[in-house]
Image (cartoon, grey):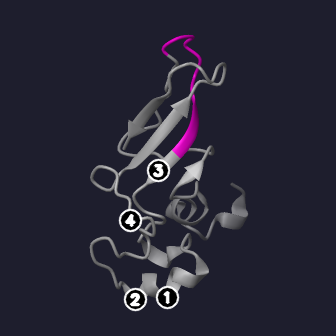
Amino acid sequence: MDSSYAQYPREFYSIHLGNAPGWKVGGWPSWGRTDPNPQYCTVCEAQMVPLLTIASWGWDGGEGHSWAPREDQAAALAGSSYAGRNPSQPTRVEVGSTDNMQIYVCPTSPGHPHTDLIQ
């Protein structure tokens, strides 16, 4: 980053500018409890690519709610939530203990087995 971001702490990037939280196709999976761990195809050993992320939360409930859709920001700031009714959990899908499930595919052949990672 250049000096134009000097006034912002490092957390500003991860909260407001880093990869988007929530469900997504492709893209870059977020880091979970571990550093990024490359997934390899069991058939050809190619590094697999992310196909789908199934997220328990649509956005982080942290400061600013910058990833919250505009129409949900007032509810997010009000903190009106209870099990299955949190505005940041619009799908009401919960993976594990509010984790993300990432599904990876082999870039060389769609017929090769996929793999998943929950974190």
The quadrant the N terminus occupies is bottom right
Compute the Cα span from label 2 to label 3: 26 Å
Q: Which residue corresponds to mark 2?
A: 78
In primary-sequence order, the first of circles 3 and 1 is: 3
- At numbered mark 4, what does the secondary structure look like: helix, strand or loop? loop
The quadrant the C terminus occupies is top left
Which amino acid, by three-letter code, is at mark 3?
Ile
Q: Which residues are magenta?
A: 42-52
- At numbered mark 3, what does the secondary structure look like: helix, strand or loop? strand
Which amino acid, by three-letter code, is at mark 2?
Ala
- At numbered mark 2, what does the secondary structure look like: helix, strand or loop? helix
Which amino acid, by three-letter code, is at mark 4?
Arg
Please say if the residues under marks 3 and 4 sit with CB atoms less than 8 Å apart: no
Compute the Cα span from label 3 to label 1: 25 Å
Locate residue 5 relative to residue 72 in the image: left or right.
right
Mark 1 or mark 4, whichever is nearer to me: 4
Numbered tag placed on residue 54 in the rendering:
3
For the point 57% across and 11% down, which residue is it? Answer: 44
Residue 44 inside the magenta-drawn segment? yes
Graded by Cα atoms within 10 Å as few (under 14), some (14 to 19) or many (20 or more), the crowding at tag 2 reads few
Q: Which residue corresponds to mark 4?
A: 92
Compute the Cα span from label 3 to label 4: 11 Å
Graded by Cα atoms within 10 Å as few (under 14), some (14 to 19) or many (20 or more), the crowding at tag 3 reads many
Please say if the residues under marks 1 and 4 sit with CB atoms less than 8 Å apart: no
